[in-house]
Amino acid sequence: MTEFQVRKDNLAQSRLVSTSVSSKTVPEGSVVAQTDCFAFTSNNITYGVAGDMLGYWQFFPPAEDDGNTWGVLPVWGFADVTHSNCSQIDIGERLFGYFPPSSHLLLRPASIKDTVFFDGSEHRASLPAGYNRYRRVSNEPGYSSAGDNRAGDSRAIDSRAMDELQALLFPLYITSFCLWDALTENHWHGAEQIIIMSASSKTSIGLGYALAQDASAPAVLGLTSMTHCDKLGSLNLYGNCIAYDNLADVPNVPSVIVDMSGNSDLLGRLHTLLGDNMKQTLNVGVTHWEQPRKREGIISDRCEMFFAPSHIQQRFREWGPEVFEQRSTSFLNDAFSKSMSWLNIERLDGLPGLVSVYADVCAGTIPLDKGLIIKM
Ligand SMILES: NC(=O)c1ccc[n+]([C@@H]2O[C@H](COP(=O)([O-])OP(=O)(O)OC[C@H]3O[C@@H](n4cnc5c(N)ncnc54)[C@H](OP(=O)(O)O)[C@@H]3O)[C@@H](O)[C@H]2O)c1
């Protein structure tokens, strides 16, 4: 087994670790899943930034780590069951969910239903349920596996592209859907303007799609770095795009801020500029993870953390999982197909491929129209 690990106290540093694990002795009730492909974006770096605070380091304990120095950043992707000692899960089944960036994962399926199960491994028991949920995609109606690609026909190519879009965009656009849902539920916090920070991130772009299809949504302003401004503007997603350098141009009207950047210097300056017009800020992400944390200017009593898995659990309780899935799937399908007009998938060869782009993902220099897929 080979695994991609990062230093917990210096996320920019990574290593590949190989260990010999015998898959002949799969414990009773467990299965081995062999990773096929997964996506990698700033979201995965954020799992490391919030690793201690939100428990992300606990999902996949690193191999060969004596000094509690290294950690494994979770990724979203597809894997195929290669060994099964669980009577309800067959060898060959394809799974979608949360995996380590490694060749294999041992899972202990629990609460098994036709199209879903949860990993019942003890070390994951206290972690958010949404991350322990695996979709048994082979059993989903209409699913065609990228593994059916042997004939090389166009249908198989489409299924590979669909898997890649799912791996890349599902965890991000489901968050966009939840953000839109939370904003509407709160009547836009009385704002006339929604300001999205780190507007070139895919989670932001997904929110742009959700807001664009809602006639009741206020004007949308994307804030981004100078290098992304033109390209982002050309996607025509937001009513207006402004570079961080031109913060003073932000219209001073009642605003709600959706912050994917975690850049407290920028946020403090924006809060100071808007004053009473800053109605509410949703702290969603930390793409600018290397920036020092500051408090100056931040109106903290009108800031709230937004965590998509908690929002989904809340809606599961209120609407039921079926209604949530129905509503979110309709949005996701539409947003996926719109994204195909600008998104270019770059396939990288295995974990060495991930190593080759890791520094660029950390530095935020991946072009906004590129989606990275690691094909194992
Ligand atoms: N709270 C939740 O439940 C939840 C769920 C999903 C995602 N998120 C968060 O949303 C954020 C966006 O994730 P994503 O995967 O959609 O991002 P992404 O598509 O990979 O976004 C890349 C963009 O982030 C900015 N960036 C990245 N690294 C940077 C760096 N080192 N310095 C400066 N800017 C950098 C740049 O945008 P700009 O130039 O526009 O700033 C860059 O274009 C992440 O922090 C993620 O964890 C939160």
Image (cartoon, rainbow, N blue to C red):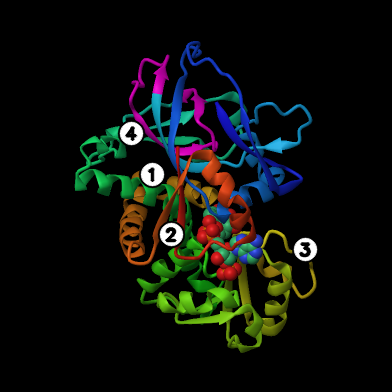
Marker disc for residue 177? 2
Residue 94 painted magenta = yes
- Read off the magenta span: 82-109
Instruction: Give the residue number, with chain letter if any, for mark 3.
Output: 292
Which secondary structure lies at badge 1? helix
Mark positioned earlier in the residue sequence (1 or 2): 2
Q: Amino acid at mark 3?
A: Pro
Mark 1–mark 2 distance (CA, rounded to whole Å)? 15 Å
User: Which is more foreground, mark 3 or mark 2?
Assistant: 3
Marker disc for residue 288? none
Which secondary structure lies at badge 2? helix
For the C terminus, give its image quadrant. top left
Q: Can you tell which quarter of the image residue 134 is in?
A: top left
3 and 1 marks in contact (CB < 8 Å): no
Instruction: Give the residue number, with chain letter if any, for mark 4.
Output: 115
Mark 3–mark 1 distance (CA, rounded to whole Å)? 39 Å
Which secondary structure lies at badge 3? loop
Q: Residue 108: horizontal and vertical position, in percent? A: 49, 22
Quick check: 19 above or below 293?
above
Mark positioned earlier in the residue sequence (3 or 4): 4
